[in-house]
Every structure is written in C-alpha cells, then in structure tokens.
Image (spheres, rainbow, N blue to C red):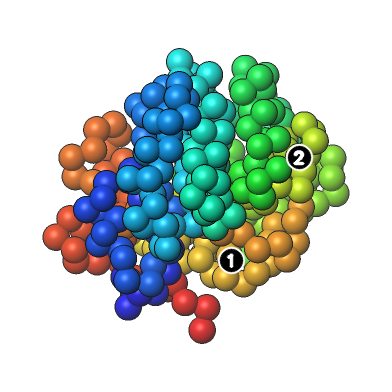
C-alpha cells in the first residue's frame, strides 16, 4: 500500500487476519467497533478489557484510533444509549495496558447529526436536538482525552439531493478562480469556494454552539462514485473530486473557519463493492475494482 502512497487506512472491524496483514506495512490504522458489539462492551468493563486485550493489544503498534461504532446516533438510534459507556469502557481498558495516549477513542458520525433546517449557511450549523443528550457527554469525553470528532462528509450526497441548487464545480472542489460559484456566509463573513469546506465548517459551528469549538475534526469518509446510473457518477468526476480533496488537504490551507488547521481525511473506499446493497452508486466508490485493477489514478503524495 505504501507504494501507492497510502500511509493511513480505515478498517471497518477488528478482524485479526486483516489487522495482521497490515503489520510491518508502515500503514497506520484506524479501526472500528462494529455497532452490534456496543451493548456488550457497554455492559461490562471486564468484557471491554478482554476485547482490547485480544483485538487491539497485539496490533497496538500500528493503530492510532478506535472508532466505537459507525453513525450510531442517526442510523441505529436504538443503540445510542450504549455508545458513551462503550467508549468509556474501551478507553479505560486501553489505560489498563498503558496505551490510552497512543490509541485514541472516538465514534463516527453521519452529517445528519446536524439539524437539516439549520445547516446553511455554515454559521447556522447546529446539532439536531434529538442527538444532544448523547452527543454532549461524548464531546466532553473527546475533549478530555484529546481525541478528534469523527465525521463522514459527502458533498456528493448533498449535490444529488439539492435539485440543482448546488453547482457541480462547487461540489467537486473545482471552482477555485470562479467566483460565480462561491458561497458567502453573511452570518460569519466567510466565503466558501467549495462544498467540502462548507460541510466541515457547519460541523465546527455546531460544535462551537455546544461549547466544543476547538475539538479537532477528522473526516473518516469522503468520496465520489465513478458509476451508478446518475449523470454525476462518472470516472471523471470521481477522479476530479478525490484528487481535489487530497490536494486541498495536503496543501494545508484548512477551511475558512479554521484556516491553516491540519485536517486528516480518509478517502472512501479502497475497492468497489459489487455486492453492496442500496442505490447502484453505493457499489462504485472504490479506487480499485474487486480484481485489484485501478478505476483511476489518485495522487496521494504532496511532493
């Protein structure tokens, strides 16, 4: 993977065979607790300690982050009450093995943790009231442990649901030097040249409103499908979006709300998923086909 410029990867479970494959590769990992494990890990600190001992400790030298669940507060709300206790128990178990400073614990959120009626312009951003009782303790935990707020950010999804109100160059980070596509935020005085920055800053403003405006933010997923039956789902657009995101992040410019603040971003996904259910485009976010041939080239180096 390093030959392709990949230095960090997100693994969506803690399968020991997968983790073992990364050992010695030089690739740093972020791993995920699957949502189905949350209740068990929340219920008993001893179970969480055993989980860390068997799933994390053997591979700790290559792991930077554990995401406890994925989009729980909006896609599996019945598990919301387990999320914070599971995070606490896993962090405590990491501390038992003295790796809590090296391996940070967070959880990944979907964009719809935001109140859809107050998500534009970015300065209006605020969390949906339905998630606040769970979100605020989690944010306090992240603040106290130095872990980032994790979010999946998809300008593609906003673009296809906007009925033409969002212009394609703005969604593809392809509007620099074309002010006719820029969006001015009258509330903050900031100007946005692309939707990616606007979506991130909407989250930052929401964090600010509940007292956690300085939390670091990590984009755990972003991407654009290369096929899928829509006018926008082309190889050209996917390559343009992902390369523009990489160049934007490696350029170190940050966002209008957080200029020059480094941002870690994971491109979704490594492979197309030809058995994935849902809309056709869900199968086509990958940089590679299942046979490991490239869908398109992605520049992952800053030099």
Image spot of residue 136 (x, y percent): 69, 28
The image quadrant of residue 204 is top right
- Image mark for residue 212: 2
Nearer the observer, 286 or 22 = 22
Decide: is 146 above or below 84.
Answer: below
The image quadrant of residue 271 is bottom left
Nearer the observer, 160 or 17 = 17
Label 2 residue SS? loop
Nearer the observer, 176 or 19 = 19
Tell me how many marks there are: 2
Decide: is 215 above or below 6.
Answer: above
Image spot of residue 25 (x, y percent): 32, 71
- Image mark for residue 210: none
Label 1 residue SS? helix
* Residue 131 relative to residue 67: left or right: right
Q: Which of the image's four quarters has the N terminus?
A: bottom left
Question: Mark 1 = which residue?
Answer: 248
**Residue positioned 37% across, 38% down in the render:** 50
Nearer the observer, 236 or 115 = 115
Disc 2: CA contacts within 10 A as few (<14), some (14-19) or many (>=20): some
Choose mark 2 or mark 1, whichever is in front: 2
Image spot of residue 256 (x, y percent): 75, 56
**Residue positioned 25% across, 54% down in the render:** 18
The image quadrant of residue 58 is bottom left
Mark 2 or mark 1: whose residue is earlier in sequence: 2
* Residue 259 relative to residue 175: left or right: right
Identify the residue at the far bottom of this view. 303
Decide: is 88 above or below 204.
Answer: above
Disc 1: CA contacts within 10 A as few (<14), some (14-19) or many (>=20): some
Res. 302 in view: yes
Q: CA distance from mark 2 to mark 1?
A: 25 Å
Res. 122 in view: no
């Amino acid at each position: 993977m390093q030959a392709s410029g990949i230095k960090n990867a997100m693994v969506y479970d803690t399968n020991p065979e997968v983790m073992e494959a990364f050992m010695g590769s030089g690739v740093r990992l972020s791993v995920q607790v699957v949502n189905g494990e949350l209740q068990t890990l929340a219920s008993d600190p001893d179970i969480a300690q055993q989980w860390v001992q068997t799933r994390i400790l053997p591979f700790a030298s290559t792991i930077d982050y554990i995401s406890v669940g994925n989009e729980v507060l909006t896609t599996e709300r019945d598990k919301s009450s387990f999320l914070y206790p599971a995070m606490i128990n896993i962090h405590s178990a990491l501390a038992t093995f003295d790796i809590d400073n090296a391996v940070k614990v967070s959880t990944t959120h979907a964009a719809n943790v935001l109140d859809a009626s107050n998500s534009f312009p970015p300065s209006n951003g605020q969390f949906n009231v339905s998630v606040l009782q769970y979100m605020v303790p989690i944010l306090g935990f992240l603040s106290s442990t130095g872990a980032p707020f994790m979010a999946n950010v998809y300008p593609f999804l906003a673009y296809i649901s906007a009925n033409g109100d969002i212009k394609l160059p703005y969604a593809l980070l392809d509007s620099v030097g074309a002010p006719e596509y820029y969006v001015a935020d009258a509330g903050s005085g900031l100007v946005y040249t692309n939707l990616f920055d606007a979506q991130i800053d909407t989250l930052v403003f929401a964090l600010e409103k509940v007292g956690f405006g300085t939390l670091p933010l990590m984009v755990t997923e972003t991407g654009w499908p290369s096929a899928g039956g829509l006018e926008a789902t082309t190889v050209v657009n996917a390559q343009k979006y992902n390369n523009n995101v990489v160049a934007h992040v490696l350029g170190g410019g940050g966002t209008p709300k957080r200029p020059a603040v480094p941002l870690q971003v994971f491109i979704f996904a490594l492979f197309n998923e030809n058995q994935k259910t849902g809309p056709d485009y869900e199968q086509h976010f990958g940089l590679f086909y299942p046979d490991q041939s490239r869908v398109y080239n992605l520049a992952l180096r800053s030099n």
